[in-house]
Image (tube, coloured by chain):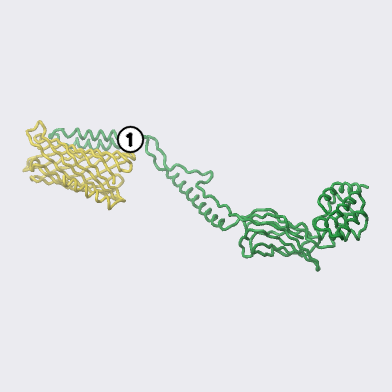
Chain colours: A green, B yellow
Amino acid sequence: MRRSLVWMAALLVAGPAALAAQQNPTVIQAQQAYDEIDYEQSARLARQAIDGGASGRDVILAWQIAAYSYASLGMDAQADSAFKELIFLDPSAEPDPLQFAPRIISAYMNALAAVLVVRFPSIETTEFVSGQGSAEIGFELSRPARARVTIVGPGVDIQLDEFLVQRRGAVEWNALDGSGSPVPPGDYEVLIEAEELGNSSIAAVTFAVRQAPVDTVVHIDRIAGFNYLPEDEVPPRDWRPLGVAGLYAGLSTGAAFALSDAGLGDNWRMPIIAVSTTTLLTGFVMSLRRPDPVPVPGNIQYNALLREQIARRNAEIAQENQTRRRQVLVTIEPREGGFQ
Amino acid sequence: MRRVLTTVAILAGAATTASAQTIWVAPAAALASYQERGEQVQYDGFGFGGMGGFNFGRLSIEAEGYIATMKPDDETTLTDDVKFKQMDVRVGFDIVSAVTVQAGLSGRQADPEFSVPDVGFIRIGLKSEQAIARIARVWVRGAYLIPKFNTGGDAGFAFELGLGTYIGAASGRFGAIVQYDFTRIDRTVNAVDLPLQLMVAKFGLQLGL
C-alpha cells in the first residue's frame, strides 16, 4: 500500500515534466494513460509510438513508459526487454529509488546488469598548468569490463589508459600530447570504450581546451620582515675638530713666535695670528656643527647580506620565470554534446 | 710671474692625463712681510700667486708661488719698493696616517737685484694634515732649510713653519684655503750675523679638477 502511494506521488511529480518534453501525440496519450494509472493502455500506446517511428526524446520516453508500465503490471520479460532498450538509448536515465516503486527499480537493475554500457561519462571543469596538474575523467560501467579511455582532438589521438573497471572508473589527464608538449587549444572528445565477452559500449564527452600564458613571478626588492639598516650614523657631537685645530695652530704659531728673531720686529705677527684665528674658528664651527655621518660596519655587512639574498632570490625567480614562460595554463571546459 | 703661470699650467696639464688622482689649483692673494739685519730692512707687501697640488696614492706634489710688491716700512730709511718672486715645490710621501715627509726646493728673487739677497734652498720636513670634518681640514708643517744666497754668506739655523686650513666642498672641487709660511734663516756674512725672516700668508680659492 505504501509503495503504491510513493509510486503515485512520483508520477504526479514526474508526469507533467515528461509530458512537456515530448511532442509525439501517441507518446502524449501514453503518458496521460500512465498518469491515470492505466498501465495496460500506457504500455500499448507506448509500443504503438515506438512501432510508429517515434524518434529522439520521444522514443526514449516511449520506452521508459513501456518499461515502467510492464514492470508495474508484473510483466517481467517485457519489462526487462523494454528497460534494456531504454538503457541502450539513455544509459544515464535510471529511475530514482526514492520516487519509483521497488518493483521498477528491481526490474531496471536486472536489465542493467544484463547489458554492458558506459554511463555518466564526465570530465571536470578545471584549470591547471599543463604537465603539473590534471583533469579527472570519470565514468561508470553497468558491469565489470575492460575500459579504454582515449582523447581525440585537433591533431591529437592519445590513449590515456586501458584497464579493468568493476563499476566506477577514473583517469587523470595532464593535457600533454604524446611528445610531452601541451595540447593545442580547441574542441576535444574523451572516448570511453568498454568491452567484455564480445559486448561493447562507447561513450564520449565533448570538451574545450583553452590556453593562456602562465603568470610570471614579480622580482623582489625587499624581503618581508627584513629592512635595510642605515649604513651610516651621526655620532655624538664632540670637540675634536676644535682640539685638532687648536693643537695645530698652537704648535705652529707657538713655534714661530718662540723661534723668531726678536730683533727683527713684529710686523710679521698679525697675519700669522689672523691665519691661526681662522683655523681655530674653523675648528670651533666644525665642533658646533652637526657631526658628519660615519659608516656603521655591522649595518653595511648586514645590508650586503640582505642584498645578496635578494639577488639570489631574484636569480631563482628569473629561472622560474624562464620555465613558466615555456608553460601553458590549460582550462578544461565540458561542452554540450557527446554520444552513447 | 711666468714661472707661477708655467707651474699652474703644468699642474692643469697633468690633470688631463691623471684623472683618477686628486689635482687641485688655487689662485691666491698673498700678504708678505720681510725683515733683515735688525730693523734696518723691513718690507711689507701684497701680491698675487697660486697654489696647486697633485696626490697619487701616498705620493703628493705641491707647488706654490707668488709675486708681491714690497714697500719699505715707514720706520726705515729705505725708499724704493722691491718686487718679490718666489716659487716653492714640495714632494711628499705619507709615512703614516696624517704624517707626510716632505722634501723640496725653493727660490726667491728680488727686483731690483741685490736690494735684498736672493735665496734658494732645499727643504726637508714633515707635514701633518687632519680632516676635522668632511668639509674642513687643517695642516701644519715644518722643515729644515739648507739655503744659498746670491750675495754670499752662510746660513746656520734655518727653518720654516706653516699652518693652513681648508674649508669647502667635501669633494674638494670648491673651497677656500688660508695658510701662512714663516721662514727664518740665520745668515752670516764675513762672521757678521745678518739674520732674515719672511712671512707669507695666502688666501686662495681652491678648484679641484
Q: A270 or A91: which is nearer to us?
A: A91
Secondary element under disc 1, as helix, strand or loop, is: helix
Q: A339 or B167: which is nearer to us?
A: A339
Place residue A322 in its image quadrant: bottom right
As drawn, the residue found furthest toward the bottom would be: A198
Q: Residues within 10 Å of mark 1 (few under 14, many from 20)?
A: many
Q: Residue at x 35, y 32 (%)?
A: A288
In which quadrant is the C terminus of chain A drawn? bottom right
Q: Let me know if residue A204 appears in the view.
A: yes
Q: Is residue A194 left or right of residue B180?
A: right
Q: Is residue A229 left or right of residue A153?
A: left
Looking at the image, residue A276 lies above or below residue B109: above
x%, y% of residue A300?
Answer: 44, 45
x%, y% of residue A230?
Answer: 44, 42
Q: A106 or B31: which is nearer to us?
A: A106
Place residue A149 in its image quadrant: bottom right
Q: Chain of mark 1?
A: A
Q: Is residue B207 left or right of residue B33?
A: right
As drawn, the residue found furthest toward the top would be: B75
x%, y% of residue B85?
Answer: 14, 43
x%, y% of residue A187?
Answer: 67, 59
Give, as a three-letter code, the residue at label 1: Met
Q: Residue at x 17, y 40 (%)?
A: B183
Q: Let me know if residue A110 appears in the view.
A: no
**Count of marks placed on residues:** 1
Tell me the residue that label 1 is attached to.
Answer: A286
